[in-house]
């Protein structure tokens, strides 16, 4: 059964599409198959991020598929040295997105993991070819908006003081830098303030936060201190794992900084929430 929401998004089994009335003039509706890779944290803890991403793309006329077979990218196992287990997850993703033209995720970290797939399958010619294809068609959300769709201005209005944290994997593995800045700078009434020592790690690092809890805790406290120095009302970024880590520290210290994924901020800005 189809379900119509109040912002023009119609959901079907495995698919989110848009009514023609919801398409804006800011981008032509591309005749491509775009698949959402939701990632574990967004799926299990922050599903609203996937919803915001889907609705923003719907406003641009992009049909968004959601292959139900998708699973974890395998990064926790890969980073811990369990490559056989990581291969199993990776193989499932190769199959899940085999028919997609583009794969987008609200996480530079998980897309960065896909860039390791050719190494995982270097001795498997068939899957190596699939891994290279998936790597070449996978994008973090802001990369897809700016690089593929050519959209840097969504017409958003967000009258708040905001600072931005560039997560390590997105900025270092994928080279994401200009895309989120372009999107933020085009938001009306948004006061963007630089984050001191912005490129310093927040201390999460997946299993690192468990294995080296003391060091991880010190790193996130330092990061949160820098966020507070900006006097920003809102902290935004591209990876919910990092934002969750920083938000936890701020909340523990009873600091009222709102923490939002950039997709969430942009959708609130265009919907007038």
Image: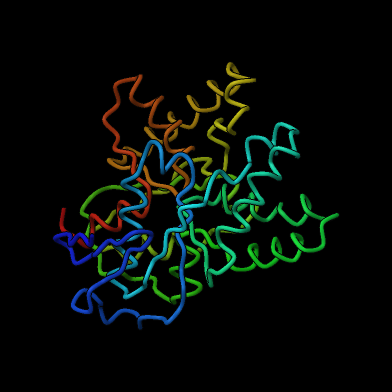
Image spot of residue 187 (x, y percent): 29, 63
Residue at position x 35%, y 81% in the image: 29
Give the farthest residue toward the right.
123
Q: How is the image coloured?
A: rainbow
Above or below, 217 relative to 22: above
Image spot of residue 243 (x, y percent): 43, 38
Which picture quadrant has residue 208?
top right
Residue at position x 42%, y 82% in the image: 31
Give the farthest residue toward the top.
214
Image spot of residue 170 (x, y percent): 57, 52
Which picture quadrant has residue 158?
bottom left
Towards the viewer: 161 or 46: 46
Towards the viewer: 178 or 265: 265
Above or below, 213 relative to 18: above
Above or below, 22 relative to 230: below
Left or right: 251 with respect to 171?
left
Quadrant in which the N terminus is drawn:
bottom left
Looking at the rendered structure, the number of numbered marks drawn on it comes to: 0
Left or right: 234 with respect to 180?
left
Left or right: 147 with respect to 175?
left
Residue at position x 56%, y 43% in the image: 72
Image spot of residue 219 (x, y percent): 55, 27
Residue at position x 33%, y 24% in the image: 251
Left or right: 80 with respect to 191?
right
């Amino acid at each position: 059964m189809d379900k119509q929401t109040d912002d023009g998004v119609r959901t079907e089994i495995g698919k989110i599409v848009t009514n023609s009335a919801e398409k804006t003039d800011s981008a032509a509706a591309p005749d491509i198959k775009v698949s959402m890779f939701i990632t574990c944290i967004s799926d299990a803890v922050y599903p609203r991020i996937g919803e915001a991403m889907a609705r923003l793309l719907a406003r641009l006329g992009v049909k968004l598929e959601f292959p139900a077979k998708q699973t974890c990218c395998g990064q926790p196992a890969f980073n811990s040295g369990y490559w056989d287990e990581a291969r199993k997850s990776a193989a499932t993703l190769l199959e899940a997105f085999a028919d997609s033209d583009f794969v987008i995720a609200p996480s530079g970290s998980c897309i960065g993991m896909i860039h390791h797939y050719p190494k995982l399958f270097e001795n498997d010619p068939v899957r190596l070819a699939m891994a290279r294809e998936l790597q070449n068609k996978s994008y973090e959300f802001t990369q897809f908006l700016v690089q593929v769709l050519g959209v840097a201005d969504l017409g958003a209005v967000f009258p708040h003081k905001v600072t931005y944290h560039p997560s390590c994997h997105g900025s270092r593995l994928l080279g994401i830098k200009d895309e989120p800045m372009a999107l933020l700078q085009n938001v009306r009434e948004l006061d963007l303030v630089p984050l001191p020592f912005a490129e310093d790690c927040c201390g999460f690092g997946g299993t690192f936060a468990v294995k080296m809890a003391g060091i991880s805790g010190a790193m996130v406290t330092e990061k949160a201190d820098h966020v507070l120095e900006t006097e920003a009302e809102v902290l935004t970024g591209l990876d919910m794992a990092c934002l969750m880590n920083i938000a936890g520290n701020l909340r523990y210290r009873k600091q009222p900084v709102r923490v939002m994924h950039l997709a969430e901020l942009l959708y609130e800005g265009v919907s007038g929430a």
